[in-house]
Image (spheres, rainbow, N blue to C red):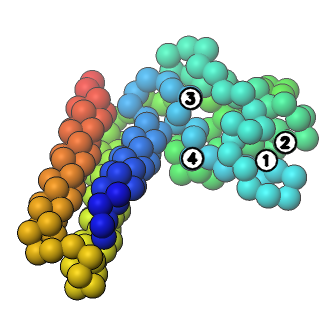
Amino acid sequence: MTAGIDLNDIKRRMDGAINAFKSDIASLRTGRASANILDPVMVEAYGSRVALNTVANITVPEPRMLGVSIWDKSMVGAVDRAIRESNLGLNPIVDGQNLRIPLPELNEERRKSLVKVAHGYAENSKVAIRHVRRDGMDSLKKAEKDGEIGKDDARSLSEKLQKMTDDTISDVDRLLAEKEKEIMQV
C-alpha cells in the first residue's frame, strides 16, 4: 500500500468490472447453445428470488437445444414462467420435471440487437472502471493535500492509475470485439 492509494485494491476493483462484463456477454446467445444463456434468469422459489441453477440442472444435449432438469416438481411452473419472462426470447417445452428449450435460428436483425446489448454492457463496464479511477484520483488528491505524499509521487501514482485504467478499458474493447465477431458469424 502506497501512502494515499492502494493500487492492488484499485486493480482488484477494475478486474471485478471486467469479470462482470465477461459474465454479461457470456449470457448473450451466439447461435449455439450454452448453459450460460440462462445465467440471468431468476426464479421465484420458496419465497425469494434465486438463480435458476440453484433449483435445476442445465445441460446442452444438442447444439440448438438446452435441457433444464428441475429438482423439485413443484418448481416446474415457476421455472417455466421465469424463462419465458426473462426477455431472452426462449419458449420452454415442459416434459414432466424437465424443460426442453429449443434455440431459434438467429436472423440478421436479432444479431444486430445482440451486438447493441453487448455494446451497452461494455459501456456500463467502462463507466464502472472510470468510477474506480475517480475514487483513486480522489484518494490521491486527498493524500497530497494532507501532506501524506509529495507532488512528484502523486503525479507518478496518477500516471500509473491512468495507465491501469487505459489497459483495463482496452481489455473491455478487445472482449467486445471478439463477442461482436462471434455474434455476427453466420
Q: Residue furthest top?
A: 62
Sequence-wise, which precedes: disc 3 or disc 1?
3
Q: Nearer the viewer, residue 133 or 154?
A: 154
Disc number for residue 140: none
> Residue visible at 58% across and 38% down?
38
Which mark lies nearer to you, 2 or 4? 4
Alpha carbon of mark 1 to alpha carbon of mark 4: how far? 15 Å
Disc number for residue 75: 2
Per the image, label 1 sits on a secondary structure element best described as helix
**Residue 75 to residue 45: above or below:** above
Q: Is residue 97 left or right of residue 138?
A: right
| Residue underneath mark 1 | 78
Sequence-wise, which precedes: disc 3 or disc 2?
3
| Residue underneath mark 3 | 35
Q: Is residue 139 left or right of residue 98?
A: left
Alpha carbon of mark 2 to alpha carbon of mark 4: how far? 18 Å
Q: Amino acid at mark 4?
A: Pro
Q: Residues within 10 Å of mark 4 (few under 14, many from 20)?
A: some
Per the image, label 2 sits on a secondary structure element best described as helix
| Residue underneath mark 4 | 40
Sequence-wise, which precedes: disc 1 or disc 4?
4
Kindly indicate whether the residue at mark 2 contacts the one at mark 1 (C-beta within 8 angstroms).
Answer: yes
